[in-house]
Each structure stands twice: as C-alpha cells, then as structure tokens.
Image (cartoon, rainbow, N blue to C red):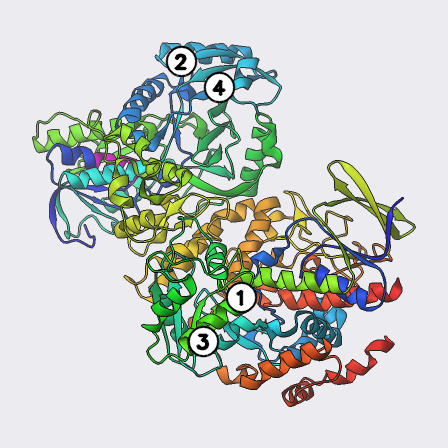
Amino acid sequence: MAISDDVLVIGGGLAGMTSALAAAEEGVRVRLLSYKKSTLRNASGLIDLLGYADGGIVADPFEAIPALHEGHPYERVGVERVREGLDLFDESVGASYLGGHTDRNALVPTYGGTVKPTARYPVSTAAGLASDARPVLLLGFEALSAFDAPLAAEHLRAAGVPFDVRGVSIEFPKRFRADATAMRFARALDRDEPADDADIGTRAALVEEIKDHLDGAERVGVPALLGDEDPEEVRGTLESGLGVDVFEVPMGPPSLPGLRLEDRLYDALDDAGVRVRTGNPVVEFDPDDGYITTVYTDRNGQHVPFEAEEIVLATGGLVGKGVKSDRQAVYEPVFDCHVPHPEDRYEWFRDGAFDDHPFARFGVSVDRDLRPLDADGGVEYENLRAAGSVLGGYDLAAEKSGSGVSIATGYAAGRAAGECA
Amino acid sequence: MSSRTGTDTDVVVIGGGSTGCGIARDLAMRGVDVTLVEKGNLTHGTTGRMHGLLHSGGRYAVSDQQSARECIEETRILEDIASHCVEKTGGLFVQLDEDDDAYYEEKLQGCRDCDIPAEELTAEQAHEIEPYLTSDVKRAIKVPDGAIDPFRLCVANAADAERHGGRVETHAPVTDLLVEEIRAEYVVNATGAWAGRVGEMAGLDIEVRPSKGVMTVMNVRQVDTVVNRCKPKGDADIIVPHETTCILGTTDVEVDDPDEYPEEQWEVDLMIDELSALVPILEDARTIRSYWGVRPLYEPPDTGTTDPTDITRQFFLLDHAERDDVGGMTSIVGGKFTTYRLMAERITDHVCEQLGIDRECTTADEPLPGSEDAGVLDDYMDAYGLRSPIAKRSTKRLGSKADEVLETDDPNPVLCTCEAVTRAELRDAIDHSGTDLNAARIRTRASMGNCQGGFCCHRMAYELSPEYDERAVRESLDELYQERWKGQRHALWGEQLSQAMLNHALHATTMNRDRDPANDEEPGIEYGAFDAGPGPDAEADRSATAAADGRVRSDGGVSDDEKDSSENGGTGKQEESTRGDQ
C-alpha cells in the first residue's frame, strides 16, 4: 500500500520548503521528498529578490517586477504572490532575518569585496549594510584564503561606498590544518575552544586581537563563520567585548548563513506538520490520463510508492540537478518535462565568462498556474506544478533573483496545490 | 630587434617553448651569453597546449623510424634528468577485434627494430592493466610511454639557463629583427609554428605548416597508462593520463594562421565518440574543458604532402646563411616535444660552431633543477604541516625545491582543493610571474581541476595583495577567470554544465563580480536609495512581534516605512486582503 498525501513536494531546497509550508497553510496533508543536500549550503543566505533589471541596479524590486518580460517566473505568478511569498518567509524565519520593514533593496558587502542588492538579509549581516554611514573595520584571517580584508576594503572604496573602511588580516587564535573550511572556525567559536597561545577561549582571544585594530571603527565585519549552532551568542559575545556592532560577510560554500537558513526552515516545516523524507531519489512515476498518481523513490534498489493529489516539482536547476543535460539535449529528469533549449550545444553559452548565457535560463516553461508546458504549449500534467530554479526564463545570477523566485514560485505552487488538493 | 631590454648578448633565442628553453639552457651551460625572449609566458605556444605524452617512439615505429629511435633515447634521458616532470605510466597499443592484424605485426616489429622495449599482451593481460578497456580488445603491445608536464619542464630549463648566466625575458614580443635594442651576434628562431612569422621579419620564407589538434580533458583518470589504438594514423586514437586527469587526443587539420583558427564542436565530439570504442566509460564521463594546439610541422620545399598526418615529425635546422644568404640566423622547425633536448643540442652545436666555441653538450647528463635528488620526494609526508595527499602532490610538483618553497611559519592554507595547491606554492609562483595568474596557474596547476577555478580563482588573485593594488588584483582575476571559461565552453553539458552554473552563481550571485560597481566608469550606485537597516529599535520590535504571534507581516502589522514604499510600488497591501478569496 502506498504512502498517501494530499500534496507531495519533490525537492528540499528553498522552493520546495516554501511550497510545503504554503501548502500546509491550506490545512492539507503535505509530504516533502528530498534526495540530496540542498543547494542552500552553496548559497550566501541572502534573499535576493531582484537586484538588476534591464542592465541597471534595482532599488525597489516591487517597482521593477511588473515590468519583467512575459515568461519570467515573477510575471507568471504576479507581484502579489511575490509579496505573499516573502510574508510567509518572514513568518517562517522570524527574527533571524531583516529587510521586511521596507520594499527597498539593501546593499550587502560580498566576500568578493563589492556590494550587492538583496531584499532580506540574516540579522548577522545587518550592521554591514553599505547605505549605513558608520566607519567599518573589515577583519580577515590569514588561514582563510577566500576573504582578504585589506583588499576587500580597498575594493569597497573603489565601489564608492559612503563610509570609511579599513581592512586587516589577523591570525585566528587557533590553528587548523591546511584544508580547514569556515565550518571548522565556526565550531571552535561555538564551543569557545581554548586559544592556542593563551589561557582564554577563542572568543575572548579574538576580542583581544580585534581591539587593537578598532581605531574609531563603529562596526566590524568578519567572514561568515561566527558559529554554526549558536551564532547569535557568538556574535553577541564579540559585540559586548568590543563595544561595537559586529557583522558577517556572506561567503561561498560551505556557507554558514545558508546552512542556518536551512535549519530554520526545517524547523518551520516541522512546526507546520510537514512530513519530510530525505535521502532517496524519485526514479519513476505512474501517469494516468494527464495526471500523475504515484511517484516512486529508490531506496537501496527497492521502489517505494508515494501517492498524492497534487505534486510540486522543486528539484532545482542545473546546479541542483533538477535540470540535466548531455551532449545532445537538456532535459528535466524526473517527469521528463519539456525544457526549451537551442538544438546546437554551442548556442547554449556565450564567449565571455559573464555574458548573457542561454544556459543560465534553462528550465521548464510554465503557465500562470506554474504547470509545466510541453513543446506545443500544452500542460504536461494537470496536477503537477513547478517552482524554484527548475523553472526557466530567468537568470538568477545576473538578476540576483534566485531566492526570491524560489520563494515566490514555491509559495504560489504550494498554495495552489494545497487549494486544489 | 626590440624587446623590453636594451642589453647586448651573444645569442638571442626567440621562443619560450620547450625547444627555445632547451636551447637557452644548452647554450648557457656551454658558456655562451644567451638571452631568451618570449612574447607571452613560457610555454605560451605549442608546448603549453600539447597532451603531455612522453613518446616511447612506439607511435612512429612503423611510419617514421628515425623519429621513433630519437624518441626512445630522449625518453630515457628525460626520465633521468627531469624525473620531477615525468610520470612513468607505460603505454599500450591496443588492437581491437576489428583492427588489422598486419598492422599490429608491423608495429611490433617496428618497435623491435627501433630498440623500443615492446611486450605482447593477451586481451586478459591488457584488462588487468587497464580494466576499463572495451571487451573487444584482441591483444596489445606494452611500451614505455610516459606522461610529462611540459610547463614544469620548460620552467626547469629556463631556470637552469638563468642559473648558468643566461637571461630569460617573457612578455617580450619580437616586433622587428632590424631595430637593434638587443644587439646579438646570432639569432635562433625557435618559434615553432610561428617560425614563418619571425622569418618574414627578416625577409625569409620559412614553410611551416601549422596543424591544429584538439585535446579534451577528462575530470578523472579513466586510465593510468597511455592507451593508443593500434591502427594506422587516425584522429582520436590516444588517451594520456596526466596528473589528476586524462587527456583525449587528437585531430590533425592544417591551419593558415597559428593564432586564429576555428575550435570546432566536431573535434570534441569525435574524441568522445571514437575513444569510447576503446574505453567505453568515456561515453558518459565528465570532461572539464578542451584546448587546441598547433603542431609546428615543416617539410622541405617542393615535398608537396597533402595530408598533414603524413608530414614528417622530424626536425630541420635551417641555416639562413646557407639557405637564403642571410647571415647570423638559424631557424629550427618541425620536430616534437619529446626530442626537444636533442633538437636543442643540435642547434647549439651549430651555433657554437658559428661562434667558434668548442664545448661538449652536457644537457643529457646534468639533472634539471628540481630533479637533482630523486629520493627527496619521499621525505615530505608529514613535513610542513601538510596532510599527506597534499604534501605528496605539492612535493611531486616542486621536486627538490620543496624545502625552499614550503617552509614557512605563516599559515599555509590550501587554495586550490582540486589540485592540492597551498598558499606557499602559489606565492612562490607569483614571485616568478607577477600579476600573470595564468603563468602562476601553469606552474602550480591551481584552478586546473574539476571546478575550473570556480572555487579558487579569487583565492589565487587575493594572494597578489598587498604587493599589487586592488585594481591589478581585480584585473588579474578577471583575466584568469575568462581564460578558464574559454576552455570550459567545449565541455558544457552534463556535470560540467552544472559546475559552470555553480561557478556562475558563486561569482555573479554571491560575489556580484558581473555587476561590480567598482568597474563602473562613474560611481554608479546611489547608496542613499537603498535600505540602511531597520534602525536601532526595529530589530527589537520585530522580534517582539514575531515572538508574540509568530506572524510578522501578514496580519497587517505594517510599519510606516512599508506603507510608503508599497504606495510607490502600486501594489502591496490591497492584495493582502483578497488573498483568502483566490
């Protein structure tokens, strides 16, 4: 006998989790199937909504969204769903995120030394906003090669930021092996492990080291490694020791703010009564007269059936493997939904690294109810909706719209599925 | 002739590929005052774009036995003098069921005629060595092919030339052979496929016939020995294991211009389609990039070979005094990488004769820098605080220089995880190559693995600071990232397309390098138009609201700020009330 639910969400990233939460709000029975670690560990943890449109920077995404081209995921769901999705996000993450007090984007310093527009930001990054005039000290660690604080400070000055900024590199109070990542630093701070050369913990030792460099700075930025389990406490300890605000600069993978967000959302799923199954891929499904009745996951070679009234496909894009390709074609691997793409593989990209790459827009096309469309424009399956980066028609990297699209379409798909179920 | 220097020298060698570096070393070791000039990095041309095969000679044992003999002799020498550049992988000539028996017999006999050790293997024995070979294997011949790192070899030759008093000038393009900024008694043109171009400057007609070939790089080593298909000449018939990768090769198409030629999809597809017949898992394996090189083929005037595959691989020494009545210059053309040292020896003999110098060549006996003490590599497993796989690989690359490079009191993090390159090793490379990160890349292999620099290009660039300013760092990073992109374009499907999107997201989304306001001509951002934070009280208010009812906004509890901006946006709260009706 198959496990049976009202709504089945396939994919455990931001879009899938938002879908499941939105569907659960409709009072139906929801299950989420997630195969691999979500791509949130690769993401900065910032919630980009729309940072650039028509080649220019966007200060108010809600003004720019209605002007987006037909087929863009925001155009599909409409701006009100975008707002409602963000509302749901804000509810779900509570005080751990800021930015909901205004429609305007915030500019957050990146570890590449520049700034980027985003709509919601972890509270740990809030003191670093670039529209704040207070002087900044950026702090890097010699052993953490992905962030060079003096260089980032020089870069921010070149970007014309309206505040004084300096950067220094110091040694972290404890030495790790040559290939240690930010995770190892975070753990040392979580546990306040003893510093190498002193009888004090890493937190206190860090405060002592930073103090000497403050020199009038009113806020201190460090790479995002201030604790994994208890980041607020770690940051709080540093702030009270230093007497100034401390903020994190979001980093690349493995990204602590991304992982923390994942934890928050999993807690929200739990609170909402969503059943979560992880670790097994969906490998097969039963179609019946334009509907999908059952999907099967593979557990050690055993096919396990899951039945549902409504299904949300939130398996991710090229990175999350919700969209795949071979030398001949681009395809959606779970339900084989149509993915529009040029026939010639050499038309999938452009020659400049940051050119407008067609591959960045690969994904399924959908109707305004987010149902994937086949090559002729007909609905693939009546009870299947798609959300997040499995959708095509937008370039999350160039637009800075990845998280926003996941949240807005995840919300819209989950809510519609919940209503129909 | 012009270059950045204004010095005098006895001999100028033009071209910083394997041959030019080998000549510079040989001349310097014989006490000749030599300056090498190269328009780009060392290995800028063909040497940096080959498949890394150290030929046993087996490949030429039927068609070109003189080249074959030279290859086996030179391979033996390089295994000795350049041990830190060579991996003795061994090689196989694999005959499939459909392949011609007569050719196999000729190949075997040819190897024996040329003193190339050749052992016959049954299909079963071949599979024991390379389990991923197709089940269609009939039999195989085992020969002492190897893999060589051409970058490391050139750098070692150039370093040794300098150690013996020679000068090496990179990024010094030769623009004219008459302007006397470097005054030299003698000029050696060792520019390979570009020899015709340099010749033109002196009014000489040098008939090089550049021929392009593709090399497709896999993400892992599907094979650990060099695998050749045992059939007469053909495209896509060799797989060379190289460091962490395998390189599939190649095509052979004559081109007009060694700088400008099409890099074509059919060439990449051919590598995968043809070589999958030999090693079937290649069909679905991940390729990380493809690159092209041009062979510096030459044939004497009026030979008239039409198919470039048939043009001889032998080298030719063209004394322009004899040939063209232009004194003081010799060109070396044709030949192949494996025999670079022998070519250097011959031309150095010739130059010494012209200059009246009587010194024996010793390049076959003196080890290159890095290979002086072969045993030294074993001692580093726990040294320098490097975990053993990292230590193993960095000491293998650095050879006997490891001590000097890796000994540091400062933190020495791994910058490139794919290739296990630490900060100390990259900094050492930067000491030699400055802001040219592509030169640092070829010295260290940093950014040459699976991620093609997505996770490490910026880390590499940051090491340029504080010696170089922020703008220089930014420009170097852009250049390296673009160079890495160039090769990946030919591998954009499957896993590598997924990787490319991840890299794009990291560099564009997370770092915002694609829309970096620092690159704007005018200060582009009006910072005041953006959110400066909720203010000191908002954070507390917000968490209070969240804690009280668990809903922050959708209950209508909206701040003044928000009302204003939703009016501006023309949407917002009105829709909120209709939400339940839809």
Q: Amino acid at mark 3?
A: Ser
The part of the chain drawn in magenta is B17-24
Are the residues flagged by discs 2 and 3 from a single subunit? Answer: no
Q: What residue is drawn where x is 35% and y is 42%?
A: B45
Disc 1 vs disc 4: which is toward the camera?
1
Are the residues flagged by discs 1 and 3 from a single subunit? Answer: yes
Q: Amino acid at mark 2?
A: Cys
Q: CA distance from mark 1 to mark 4?
A: 60 Å
Specify whether residue A178 is painted magenta: no
Secondary structure beneath dot 2 equals helix
The local crowd at label 3, few if under 14, some if 14 to 19, many if 20 or more residues have their Cα within 10 Å, is few
Disc 4 vs disc 3: which is toward the camera?
3
Instruction: Evaluate if marks 2 and 3 touch, with contact meaning CB atoms under 8 Å apart.
Output: no
Which residue carries the number 3 mark? A240
- Quarter of the image with the C terminus of chain A is bottom right
Q: Is residue B302 left or right of residue A17?
A: left
**Label at residue B111:** 2
Chain bearing mark 2: B
Q: Is residue A14 left or right of residue B104?
A: right
Q: Amino acid at mark 1?
A: Pro
Q: Quadrant of residue A417?
A: bottom right
